[in-house]
Image (cartoon, helix red, strand yellow):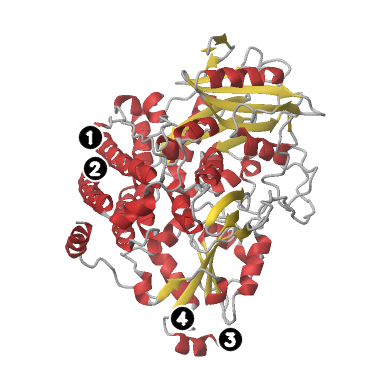
Amino acid sequence: MATHLILQKIFKTGIVSEPMPEADPSLRTRMQELQADLLKVFGRALAIRHVDAGSCNGCELEIHAINGPQYNIEGMGIKFAASPRHVDVLLVTGPVSRNLETALKRTYDATPEPKWVVAMGDCGCNGGIFGESYASCGKISNVIPVDVEVPGCPPDPVTLLKGILAAVSGGR
Amino acid sequence: MKIAGHEWDLASLGNHVWRGRIAAAELLAFAQSVKDEGGQLVALWGSDDRQLFPLSPGGRGAGGEGAGFAIHAAFITAAGLAWVSAELLADTPAYPDLAVIFPQADRMQRATHDLLGIQAEGAVDGRKWLRHGAWPEGSFPLRKDFDAEVVRELDAYPFIRVEGDGPHEIPVGPIHAGTIEPGHFRFSIIGDRVLKLEQRLGYTHKGIEKRFEGMDLATGAKLAGRVSGDSHSAYAWAYCMAVETATGYEVPERALWLRALFLEIERVANHLGDLGYLGNDVALSFGFMQFWRLKEELLRLSGRLFGHRYLFDRIIPGGAAVDLTDGSELLALAGRLEAEVRELKAIYDEHPTLQDRMANTGIVAPALAARLGLTGLAGRASAQAWDARVQFPQTPYDRLDVGMSTHRRGDVLARAEVRFAEVVESLRLIRAIVQGIPAGAIAVPVRVPDKVTEGIGWVEGWRGEILVAVRIGADGKLDRVHPHDPSWQNWPLLEVGILGNIVPDFPLINKSFNLSYSGQDL
């Protein structure tokens, strides 16, 4: 029976989740007012909306990875939500293609205040290998305000988590 | 070369690759002879040859070239990959519509028009494809005289409406609800049942082909690998194969074995991730957690052994950027992964909900798959028995005797089964490569040619065949690069596979194909 096999496998596997890394404040590019006060209320109940604004899908691989058991971000109170109206943080991968520029702006506008934007990957931070062209707006901050930039191609899961935590960790 | 009894003037261009130039008027006859033989159209693209330096006397295609535009098509034939080009007039570039023979040509022809202004004469669907509002009609980015300072215009796209009492539309995207790439799906439904699905893609179009122009060969490999990040090694290898064919330098054998090792690791990693998500999409989060635990272990070992979790930039023109010093950890992990995957497969096989959701869902019947050109792992799940590693093996696959997995059901379950079989086979290949890899250098310096040269590379990526065509200018820089993703052929089959299914099964069916947006949007 499948149930029997599943339980057996779960017990054999055990808990593989690892401790959460600390926030890395050096990744922050912008400091919003009220942030520290708000975070006392937030604690670590954080909702994130991922927006692919034109990436090669490499960064998405690592976003999937942090949902896996070793990183277990849901266990830390961080969850990915399906609508920008439900979230505190937009996690944006880029470069921003001109065909998605409007959709990204609308997503940003649809996200309630207070909100933070994490730009993920070299392309999101500086346009990367695609740069700016007839089809690409380049980095995320060319289109919407960005609070944290996480470089890497793609950034590894630990660096990504440090960046997400930096967005909401106040000045500490 | 002979195709279905016709003699065509094609010359060998590397292992299992054929190259020829024909008149535009002969394209239909050529395509028909490929079709008669049971072959398929793989890719179609254009180029602006108006400013091309004339090829050296006696070189391929000498005489007359450089006058106008060209249309290129790559076909799979019994003898391998056939790449034909036809010259087109500079002022009215046009060629006959190939979609009447190979329906998969439709979107590629529309994209070629958007980017180059080359017209497929007689095509039924004249709508734009990659052009949204970022550049205006009548302006063509891949023309060499394209003015980058273009005005935006409002985007309008005429979807095909389902009329009558009862049906209504669900528009989804471009920004999707999960961690997925952006695209638009327009469902026309009655109740929960899908009457029609129409896709609108092109949102991640970031001008990759234009970006290649004028790039040096080494940077080109990095960009090629980022056409679709999940298929990095396949693209980088196909690009390097094309450059190596064009310039004629020999890559050390050890480097080819390393490239195959990277490609198989990439295949295993992606298949493990997909098998996890297929479990997740039928509410078996156990499956997601188990497969992603295994995938993460493989990624971490790749990072430790080769310096990058996804092996980015490890394949370079001339060879490989990193060597395998000690394969023992890889051998051990491959063995353990295989044992655990077999355990998990036994659970998937026995799980009633999973079987119920996956079996008979999202069916693409073999006859339809053949007619519309379904390819890669989705093709093999619908009895399309093509795998470049099997039929047309390059080194080292010619020494590894790759086994191919096929099914006839063409449903979500068949696509999962093919993944299971391919994970096990790739783990065997990884062990065989680690044990059999020859000693020697891993790279040679790249000689930059001083005349116009061309080449094509063709690699069986985890999703299907990845093809990269390259033309290098007399200045040694890239003049024209066309990367082709199998998602071009397979996206239209997703529109067909969902018909008659219920809307809540769409995420599952979509994941079972797991197609690339970036790879087709370019």
- Mark 1 crowdedness (10 Å alpha carbons): few <14, some 14-19, many ≥20: few
Residue labelled with disc 4 = A169
Q: Residue at x 70, y 40 (%)?
A: B115
Q: Are marks 3 and 1 in contact (CB under 8 Å)?
A: no
Q: Which mark is residue A33?
A: 3
| Residue type of the residue flagged with mark 1 | Gln
Q: CA distance from mark 2 to mark 1?
A: 8 Å
In the image, residue B138 lies at what x, y percent?
80, 42
Q: Nearer the viewer, residue B247 or B405?
A: B405
Dot 1 falls on a residue whose secondary structure is: helix
Mark 2 chain:
B
- At label 2, which amino acid type do we have? Gly
Question: Circle 1 is placed at which residue position?
Answer: B435
Cα separation, mark 2 vs mark 4, equals 42 Å
Say if A58 sits above or below B435 in the image.
Answer: below
**Residues marked 4 and 3, same chain:** yes
Which amino acid lies under the numbered mark 4 shown in the image of this protein? Ser
**Residue A144 visible to an observer of this rendering:** yes
Q: CA distance from mark 4 to mark 1?
A: 49 Å
Task: Examine the image and state in which quarter residue A141 appears.
Answer: bottom right
